[in-house]
Amino acid sequence: MRLYSTKSRGQYTDLKEAVLRGLPPDNGLYMPERIPALPEHILRNLRQLPFADIAFEVTRNLLQGAIPDPDLRKIIEEAVNFPAPLVQLDEDKYVLELFHGPSLAFKDFGARFMAQLMSYFNRGEAQELVILVATSGDTGGAVAAGFYQTPGTRVVILYPSGKVSALQEKQLTTLGHNITALEVDGTFDDCQAMVKKAFLDEELTGRIRLTSANSINISRLIPQSFYYFEAYKQLPKGSDAVFCVPSGNFGNLTAGLLAQRMGLPVRHFVAATNINDVVPAYLETGEYRPRPSRRTLSNAMDVGNPSNFARMKDLYHDLEERSTWNKMRASITGYAYDDEQTKAGLQEVYERYGYVIDPHGAVGYLALKEHQLANPGTKGVVLETAHPAKFLPDVEAALGQQIEVPQRLARLADQPKEAVGLPADFNRFKDWLLASLG
């Protein structure tokens, strides 16, 4: 398997370097040179395959021999060992529950796969591998759980102070051991910019083995394609559904586009955002205008300059910018909703279907509903990206009643928080990295 940077399409590297570097030296993002379609017999027999077997076939096909099959099988068995059930709301609406992993968020799929892959590539290395990750909510908890006590690794998580839920924060700040949380006085975009800048700093990269666990890392992106195939196999036979994706950094939607390129029959994608609607605005106007993110109830989507937009554009690449835009908007429609609409969506899903959805899923539900009104007769799948209990005060306030909290989340409430406070200043971050890890 060869990969190139979205900023240097003619220069290639191998999977190991792409995974362990995280970010190309030109500050682009790694993309596979080829996205081969799955063999027809695999697509035809999806319904008979267990989830782990689907994940193995997808990865094996995409990696093209970069990892021997027996080793790849072990990586998949360790990473994909919890379900992604499809729940039917009505005749045309489904919810894909992606919160059955250890951190109760969809990012468990990517984080666990990444941890296994990095551990595989890191064998025999004397120097510790330091994983930097910026989080707007769920990524940090998933990465912390995925890499906890993984030999030869140290995880540093940057999160915006006061902008993640209380239980999300506890998932970042209570593990200890090889997990360190940095509480940044700023936004997620500040955290993400500091992480990206670290990879371009020659002094840091010369003294510390750095890699990333955000969806900018290709090893986070690949496993997110697995559950699109898993969802499709659970739909009624012959369905070519719309996938509605609550979106922040747009890794999840990009993974869906990968699945589509690999042969999955997808009718259309819906990009559902909150008021941080940079991509829906682009799909509407053809102009991409990043801006500072604004805080919302659906905090994991509070991203004002989504990194994976570069990959989305690359997938629809054309020398004419207008042509790239036209191709993309033919496949993806964007919708955006504010907090009051999100609360109404939470209430509507519960009152109409007896289903408790989280704020991100509520945004997805609203987008799917609007899209189906404009395109009647289409079946749609909303990706429910996190357990609603992770946003307990907001969900309970919207529904006017208590909801059940899974035990593995409830036990964190009384755990002491341990975090290092930092301003949104790269030089201070760099000084801390060199003093602590260099």
Image (cartoon, rainbow, N blue to C red):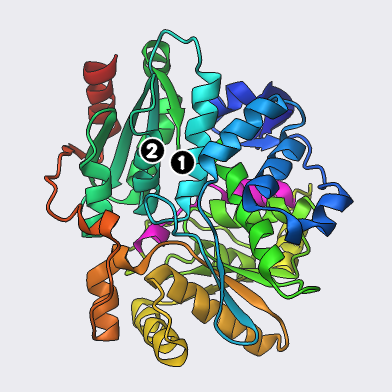
Q: Where is residue 104 in the image (x, y as percent from the top left)?
A: 39, 56
In front here: 314 or 360?
360
State whether residue 279 is above or below residue 107.
below
Quarter of the image where one finds residue 411: bottom left
> Which residue position holds label 1?
214
Relative to 423, 198 lies left or right = right
Amino acid, disc 1: Asn
Asked if marks 1 and 2 touch (Cβ < 8 Å), the reply is yes
Residue 116 covered by magenta stretch: no
- Quadrant housing the N terminus: top right
Residue 308 covered by magenta stretch: yes
Q: Is mark 2 on a helix, strand or loop?
A: strand
Determine which of the numbered discs, if any, sits on residue 133 in the image.
Answer: 2
State whether residue 374 is above or below residue 387.
below
Q: Position of residue 58 (x, y in %)?
A: 71, 44
Relative to 280, 290 lies left or right = left
Amino acid, disc 2: Val
Quarter of the image where one finds residue 420: top left
The residue shown at (42%, 83%) is 345
Q: Earlier in the sequence, mark 1 or mark 2?
A: 2
Q: Give the range drawn in magenta.
A: 299-316
The residue shown at (53%, 70%) is 272
The residue shown at (63%, 52%) is 51
The residue shown at (56%, 55%) is 252
State whether residue 56 is above or below residue 71.
below
